[in-house]
Amino acid sequence: MKKHLILTTIVLTAMLQACKDDRCECVPDDGNHPAEIIHHEINAIVAYQRHIEIDIDQNGEYDYSFGSVLIEENDLPYLYLFANGETTNGSKLLLQSNPEVLNARWARSLAKGAKIEDSAGNGNEWNVPQMHGNIIGVRDNGVQKTYIGPWIGKQHAYMGMKFKINGKYHYGWIRITHVTGKEQILVEDYAYNNIPEQPIYAGQE
């Protein structure tokens, strides 16, 4: 009896210690949502004319890209950093339903633990072809810079994604950080559920 008690205590202590790690997502397993999580590090900076492409399932084809666009409005330059899903293989991003800016919407910033699944949720939508997700916008009037967008100053926030493997959708997240006052973002890492048509929780690894 004493041996069983000691073993149980050791197991519970190890579980509690693991959940203290801010990269650990302790999600109850109700048996209805099986998960086989694939996780990869990126740690790449995206800025003006500094773009990246990501092959999520590492099959030799890019699924997502991060880039920039510089436009002029009212004689003032506007810089936008954005994410884009490759439409040829059905890759999609979770966006806010409105407003629309430059044939794009703001990418939805998710908190850790948010459920990512086929249902986009209230106020959200999965992007349609040719519509990308803006992350931050910067306006420079020559005197000061103004930053706009739901990702401003967000540390370790999550972008929802869904893409196809063998014709079936898989759900995942991409972790992004923006430092206030910087015209760049850090794309940290990503993960997805290797079991098709099953959800994943933001930050789940």
Image (cartoon, helix red, strand yellow):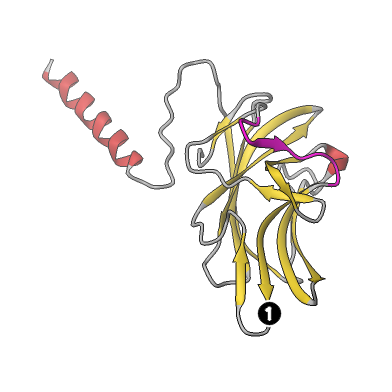
User: Vertical placement of 44 versus 94: above or below?
Assistant: below
- Is 35 or 150 nearer to us in this picture? 150
Residue sitting at the far right: 88
Q: Is residue 197 visible?
A: yes
**Residue placed under numbered mark 1 in the picture:** 141
- Front residue of 41/33: it is 33
Q: Which residue appears at 70% of the width and 62% of the height?
A: 81
**Residue 185, percent across and down?**
61, 63
**Along the line of sight, which residue is nearer the eye, 128 or 142?**
142
Q: Who's the residue at 57% across and 56% down the image?
A: 151
Count the numbered circles shown. 1
Residue at the bottom extreme? 143
- Percent x, y for residue 122? 61, 31
Image-quadrant location for residue 37: top right
Residue 40 magenta-drawn? no
Circle 1 crowding by C-alpha within 10 Å: few under 14, some 14–19, many from 20? few
Which portion, as a residue range, is magenta? 120-130
Q: Is residue 179 left or right of residue 62?
A: left
Residue 89 x, y percent position in the rendering:
84, 38
Q: Amino acid at mark 1?
A: Asn
Instruction: Please say if 155 is above or below 141.
Output: above
